[in-house]
Image (cartoon, coloured by chain):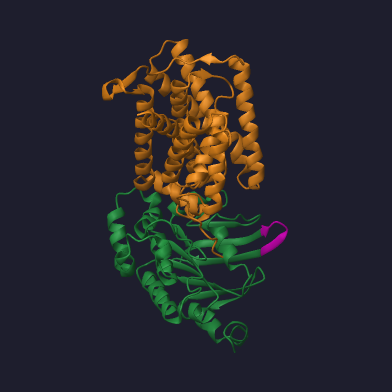
Chain colours: A green, B orange
Amino acid sequence: MEAILKVEDINVYYGSIHAIKGVSFEVNEGEIVTLIGANGAGKSTTLNTISGLLHSKTGSVTFMGENLGKIPCHKIVSKGLALVPEGRRVFLQMTVQENLEMGAFTQGGKTLDDDLERVYEQFPRLKERMKQVAGTLSGGEQQMLAMGRALMSHPKLLMLDEPSMGLAPILVEQIFDIIQELHKAGTTILLVEQNAQAALSVADRGYVLETGKVVTTGTGHELLESPAIKKAYLGG
Amino acid sequence: MEFLSYLISGVSLGSVYAIIALGYTMVYGIAKMLNFAHGDIIMVGGYISFCAMSYLGLPGWLATLLAMAVCTVLGIVIEGLAYKPLRSAPSLAVLITAIGVSYFLQNSALLIWKAAPKVYQPVVSGSLTLFGGQLSVPYASVLTMAACLVIMAALTLFISKSKMGKAMRACSEDKGAAQLMGINVNATISTTFAIGSALAAVAGVLLCTSYPTLQPTTGSMPGIKAFTAAVFGGIGSIPGAFLGGLLLGVIEAMAKAYISTNLANSIVFAVLIVVLLVKPAGLLGKYVPEKV
């Protein structure tokens, strides 16, 4: 299998704080890969660096053979790389439909109606609320909107940052079902989660981050079974 | 009839404030900065159209277009040179820079066009006589009000329906998320400055047509008043700028007519203070609590 995303030795700083210390990993085409770790381990920072919101001082991020290092953030989505950011960050004062249109900003508009149809099919709840402003949606609906918005750009790799955060268990299950559906439909997924149990059970492979470093890696199954991981992240 | 005539002059003045306030409010909504040099763009627009008409003999509409073109470029250049490098600086630094740009423009105008006021040749003259001569409405007022309505309608349509307009709203809410959508935030901010400055040029022509003296400080008072209008209506809100501008113009005209010419400005600002005490976000502004 070909690595669609290759992250090599990135180092990211917030001022003098060294948040990511030489992280390397890769995502192969068609996989679900998860980055797990506690608060402050550097999971979100890693995703934000890949998507160009933050920059690494060293190393490289290669997506489909192209180095993303010098490419400005707004040009990255059109390369087929979409991020569903932490905390959803939907446009609260815009309607559901407008949010989805923004997701298709780089798409030129020809396939807009088909894409909207496709996303509404995936998330029927959004169709019911298409004219509502996003600020009136519940947390779970906003998460669906954030995911639908990212899917509007036809991503080859979809990055999800804590999609289960703040959601009731039943909704978490629903979100993970959707992630698996998207995966079956051919989207490669890079998933960041604190909910290690849920993330590892859907993932092909996982990387465990601790204070800015990759400490363990393995298949989802291996990590779920590993005593050390169980103790640290899965509550015994 | 006298009241009606004051009202019309108030609405007309208010229309100019509204057009200027739209520029303030759009820039604030998207770049989250107060562009205090906005008033001076009006003055530049006034001088450019003055030169085009008086020295080049161009017709009023062409002079207006020329003024809009020059101000648009000026707005983009100012944004790129003075504000863009400060994108991640504290807002106070940007505010002080804006005040600096304002003085820079005024003093440049002083150098180029000298201090002596120019007599502006109105783009329209004459009056419309109504009710058998009892009420006369200057064509300048009619033009100003019509221009304001057209601009307001066009801008509302642009912001709510066009792709660029939607991108502007997205940037105004969350620049990071907008970038993730593929929106070029810097280009969007530049476009906003371009539109605001073109509107300021129109305001300059209309203002000088109604009050035909032009000097380097011409733009500062209307600029401050329009800023007041934008805050009054709710800064960041386009209908708010429109409403705030109109109300401010009417209050000013009524205060001048019935209370005191000298006190008119004090009354205008007193009303602002009262409104902000009652509604801190302005008439149509929404107080959006920060979600953490």
Q: Which image quarter is the N terminus of chain B in?
A: top left
Confirm whether residue B38 shows in the render. Answer: no
User: Count of labels shown?
Assistant: 0
Confirm whether residue A70 shows in the render. Answer: yes
Query: Which is nearer the eye, B41 or B244?
Result: B244
In this view, which residue lies farthest toward the right? Answer: A16
Q: Position of residue A46 (x, y in %)?
A: 58, 63
Q: Position of residue A214 (x, y in %)?
A: 63, 71
Q: Which image quarter is the C terminus of chain B in?
A: bottom right
Query: Which is nearer the eye, A174 or A28?
Result: A174
Q: Is residue A193 magenta?
A: no
Above or below, A62 relative to B130 = below
Query: Which of the 4 image quadrants contains residue A171?
Result: bottom left
Say whether residue A57 is left or right of residue A138: right
Above or below, A80 relative to B74 = below
Above or below, A161 relative to B80 = below
Q: Magenta residues, as a range?
A: A13-20
Say whether residue B171 is left or right of residue B266: left
